[in-house]
Image (cartoon, rainbow, N blue to C red):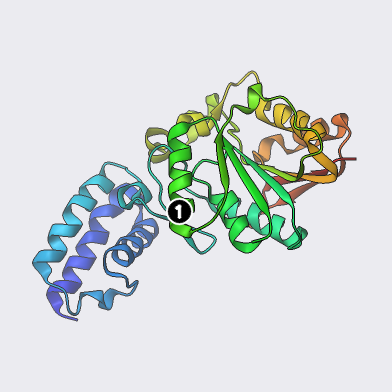
Amino acid sequence: MSLSSKVLYDQFVHDLELKWGSEESKKIAQIVFNHLFGLSRIDIFLNKSIALLDDQLIPISKRLLKGEPVQYILNQATFYGLSFFVNQFVLIPRQETEELVALILEENDHGVQNILDIGTGSGIIALTLRTHRPKWNVSGWDLSPEALEIAVRNANHLNLNVDFTCIDILNKSPDVDKYHLIISNPPYIPSSEKSSIPGHVVEYEPELALFVADDHPLIFYEVIANYALKSLKKRGKLYFEIHEDFAYQIQTLLSHLGFEEIAIHLDLNKKARMASAIRA
């Protein structure tokens, strides 16, 4: 590697450190270089023009320094080994959601089943499940037409058949005994926590998909659980991604509604971030 290319790489990482920190800056650099050049190692520079690299990196660097997430800049995010288109109409995929998908795949076999993902956003849960369970009939609902456009775009890119529909679960009547699994990663962060959320999340990611009113933080869990109580088939399963601070309340809610085998699952950081239950 030439000295000039090494200097360029180091400068890119250094420029980001004040905004993103040392380790995060290195991760961002790897994402950017892998996206631009198809390689994740620094030897991508060996056969590249320094002038060309500079032209490509400068506009990306400027947006990163303003706090914009790299996934929105590149319109790309990786989830469970798959590549998804994302923009500011949908959330950036997170590790906790990957763990929810892993739990669902671990607990459910390949047989034909009807699956519903409520609040599907970019479609990452629905499309990942469809990838790993080709026999499943998967549907995804969202209130946002813009988000659903992205979900359809991702389905087309992955050549997967998922039924995406614009539906507001807060106003949806039950579909009796229809689904084997109902899954949701709904908005669950109380508005009062905004001040403790990183700026790049609050300023760029869709508020509608993140926050709920302080006086009713479990609204989506209550509505979805009541919908699932009738819409799941007997012994059908309900899966949630949850706020760690509300794990006990969600467990109590599901118990009061009559669900069985209620479980709170810890993520890799030992935080209560998933819940599951079975319709009696």
In the picture, measured across the screen, residue 126 lies left or right of residue 206, that is right
Residue type at mark 1 is: Asn
Residue 87 occupies which quadrant of the picture?
top left
User: x%, y% of residue 58?
Assistant: 17, 54
Residue 76 occupies which quadrant of the picture?
bottom left
User: x%, y% of residue 99?
Assistant: 63, 56
Residue at figure coordinates x 38%, y 61% from the top left = 27
Work out whether residue 229 or residue 29 is closer to the camera in this orientation and state it.
229
For mark 1, what is the residue? 156
In the picture, measured across the screen, residue 250 lies left or right of residue 138, that is right
Residue at figure coordinates x 52%, y 33% from the top left = 210
In the picture, measured across the screen, residue 75 lies left or right of residue 151, that is left
In what element is the residue under mark 1?
Answer: helix
Residue 265 visible at all: yes
Residue 53 occupies which quadrant of the picture?
bottom left
Q: Residues within 10 Å of mark 1 (few under 14, many from 20)?
A: few
Work out whether residue 270 or residue 233 is closer to the camera in this orientation and state it.
233
In the picture, measured across the screen, residue 154 lies left or right of residue 263, that is left
Q: Quadrant of the C terminus?
A: top right
